[in-house]
Amino acid sequence: MDRRTLLAGTAGTLATAGLPLSARAARRDAEPSGLLHGLSPRPGLPERLPAEDPSRTLLSHGWLFHEGDIVPPAPQTHDETYTNAKAGNARGAAAMDYDDTDWAQVSVPHDWASAQGFVETANVAQGYRPRGIGWYRRTLRLEPEDRGRKLELHFGAIATAATIWINGSVVARNFSGYNAITIDLTPFARFGDELNVIAIRVDATAMEGWWYEGAGLYRHVWLAKRSPVSIATDGVHCDPRLGSDGRWTVPVSVALESIARAPATATIMVDLLDPTGKVVASARGQAQLQPLGGVEVSLSLPVDNPQRWSIERPTLYTVRVTTDAPGGGDERRIAIGFRTIRFDAQAGFFLNEQPVKLKGVCLHQDHAGVGVAVPDALLAWRLQRMKDTGVNAIRCSHNAQADAFYQLCDRMGFVVMDENRIFNPAPENMAQLEWLVRAHRNHPSIILWSVFNEEPMQGTEAGVEMVRRMAARVHALDDSRPVTAAMNGSFYDPQNVSSVVDVMGFNYYQGDYDKFHALNPAKPSTSSEDTSAFMTRGAYATDRAAHVMSSMDTEAAPWGATHRQAWAEMAKRRFIAGGFVWTGFDYHGEPTPFTWPTIASFFGILDLCGFPKTAYDIHRAHWIDDQPVVGIAPHWTWPGKEGQPVELLVTSNAERVRVVLNGRMIGEQAVDRIMGNAFTVPYVPGTLEAVALKGGREVARAVHETAGAAVALRLTPARRQMLGDNEDVVPVTIDAVDAKGRHVPTENRMTRFTIDGATLIGVGNGDPNSHESEKAPERSLFNGLAQMLVQAGEGRGRGTIVATADGLRPARLVIDRVAATPRAQVEVTPPGAFILGWRRSKSFATAPDPGMTPPVNDNNSWDFTRSGTPAAPESGPSFRLYRAVLPERRRVMAQGGTLSFAQVEGRASVYVDGRQVGAKTDPAAGALVVPVPAGAKGVAVLIEAVPGARSGITGAVRLVPKG
Ligand code: GAL
């Protein structure tokens, strides 16, 4: 294959578009270096993550959101105080009948802080974004046939402290923004037209980190409906083991629980499916469950010669657990991988007994434009960017990530250090640690549990006692993976936690690797965090006054090192298992080493949008072994610098590199794979090339061409197709090109977008100093680039994007939307208040006065009835009057609305506050919608029954605000 690499700025990135698929794939393989590389369209569509728990349905839509707190009115009277103390009687915005008609409609994942402006007085570490307090509400309809089912709500995580009410009762108080919350809805549930109300107060003034943490329901929310005897949430443990006899088994333990009213016998079937879906091992068992009891069943699946899971070939099998019991069964499908892991004190990390140097990054979870509400497709794209960088290991700094993250790591082939957030063995925090292990311990990607990051108590007796307890709890739940802690010092103190973890984790302190190792020769070690270098993407000179950091790998935090220095220390020591660069991507907040007006960090190998900095080429040269790479910095558009010397940094994994300017050889050097190769060239506009050589043959080439003035915009999608599943997201790069179609790396113009057939969910440009909105349909280019995140709608179609900028030719891009079945969603309850309680008059042979009302204090001569209840047939003419008070809804009171009767049987006339507003002349069962004027208070319905037929308001009645 032709290993020549084309560079940004050349036609390379877009020229691929018209090629047949196979040629495009080949070009992509050979793709390589420069400003846009890795960002040209990839063929294919994203793989969809399989559902592990088919009992769950996404609950993404139909949420109402109010920004700001709503303090409930304090009870005053004895009656109020008495009722306030009772279940179901929450007050204020948590109350079932709270008027939320003017709240904003939102879908989750939702991070309300990402839409905030930047405020100098707000917290610096959180990126100067006010977070504050917010409320969510959602009504949820459960069908009568859901009675007797185990019903759960699952929140992936909520930032940050959350109180959750179901139907007016508090069901959870959660204090961490990173753990999943499982709520047993079953005892609180209402069915049919009696809707359920979920109310959530989110206090995002609480901080657990020193980085941007977002605000709100920023991960997926699910509704689980299970049979009365069901598999508990996170209740299957099935992590394969290789026995000392060389044989593999999958020990499977299944936690079952029962809400049945009688003792039940459950059958448990466990199958192991190979990657093609063929069953290769099975086991079955039985269990007795007492009402409201639980039981754990252990089975074992022997497997002969399974294919191994590895970073290069992440082969996954599936453990399918099905149960059968009176009332129905349950099922889970859990991806597992057969691999062994081992940390050796002298030789580092071994995967399947092969040494693997950890080429890792630390990751926070946010991205430009969306904050922490990162859709799964964007998460997958971010991880692919890490793969392109040569990364094989990820540290979840400093907290659990979304479910999809671990699934993707399993499928893409990353090893993962999973990390606990709060260092505290008190019951509440221990429960979070237990959740972390229980929820993630089946993932083959996870190789280490980190119980903390940089804790000042790490060198104290109390710190040791705390870690002892936390490590013991981890081991009790998972005996296969070592425990580590990310220490920043104190490791020579007489009492320090390195003595009670399995693997020593160094945060920085690279000068101590050898001394610690000499003192603790039996203790395996890894860098848990390193580097902390600074780069502004696309900038090649530091200007501290302007808060700009050179991307020539010259800048690092005093506690850190440049990308090259840090890796040098790890690469040369076998006993250091590897490292985790702080960080893979820039992130909002922690704008080190600056403060206002800087709002984001400079640490990333890639910027906030995932655009590569020079660190990308540096690490590709360090980490990629299976293809030749070469990179060259800086770009080659320096008008006004003619004749001045320019320092070049050439990075490659080949044997030699040669620099060529306008066809003339400038110099050739033996490759220094770690430190890169420096060349100095007087600036002459034209074509600058770095040629990588192996055995004297060219194996890769990076090219920069001097760009002229920008004349047009260009739009480059990460993919030319998207799934019409309402979820897929395609990042689109915006750049400017000159008259010859060359990328202009110095352009900073404002660009504006219109989008048709898709939704813009965020924008960014990677500038840590920019205060532009991340939600507006416009963005300045920053050193030549900006990004928009485009979300697919549903079904086949096309998304059309037009980008314009003053003085440039606009760009137009069409992304095809391929038909795809959206993941099932819990139905959105139509807005409006249900009117459940009605008074019903006795039957009259002739029409009574519709103004008739039940006498005051007379609870007997009019029935109390509910919508949905028919009146019995009468033999002769029969008229009945129905009355109800309209619930006060601000929007209806102000603008009016409609009353919608799902079903009325008999002829009907509807009156609002005494005035007729509608009628149904056909006596057959049917729907009826009538207008309600502003300020309306009461409704009356006069129904004339057909002799011999039942009659009445036999369906749900909803009061719906206008618009
Ligand atoms: C480390 C810390 C990280 C981040 C980094 C910045 O000490 O663990 O969270 O703050 O410093 O250099």
Image (cartoon, rainbow, N blue to C red):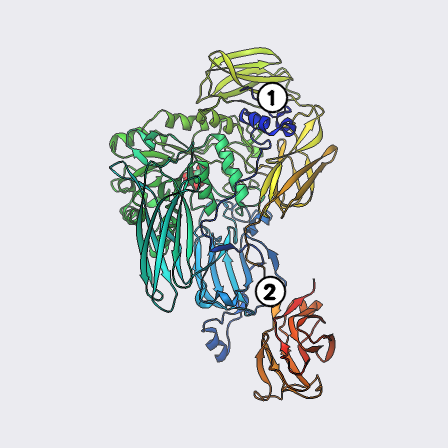
Which image quarter: residue 640?
top right
**Residue 100: which numbered mark, if any?**
2
- Quarter-wise, where is residue 255 in the image? bottom left
Q: How many marks?
A: 2
Residue 832, x across and y down, in percent: 62, 66
State the image quarter where residue 27 is shown: top right
Q: Position of residue 672 (x, y in %)?
A: 44, 18
Task: Find numbered disc 2 in the image and state the secondary structure of the residue it sits on.
Answer: loop
Give the Cα distance between marks 2 and 1: 57 Å
Q: Nearer the viewer, residue 133 or 922?
A: 922
Disc 2 residue type (three-letter): Asp
Q: Decide which of 857, 830 is in the foreground and name it.
A: 830
Asked if residue 929 is positioned above or below residue 32 in the image, the reply reads: below
Q: Is residue 587 visible?
A: no
Q: Residues within 10 Å of mark 1 (few under 14, many from 20)?
A: many
Quadrant of the frame with the C terminus: bottom right
Instruction: Specify the quarter for ligand 1.
Output: top left
Amino acid at dot 1: His
SS of the residue under disc 1: strand
Residue 58 placement (x, y as % from top left): 52, 54
| 843 and 751: which is toward the camera | 843
Residue 164 visible somewhere in the drawing? yes
Name the side, left or right, on which 447 lies relative to 842.
left
Above or below, 701 relative to 468: above
Residue 374 lies left or right of residue 559; in this view the side is right
Residue designated by label 1: 704
Tell which circle, 2 or 1, labels the residue nearer the N-terminal end. 2
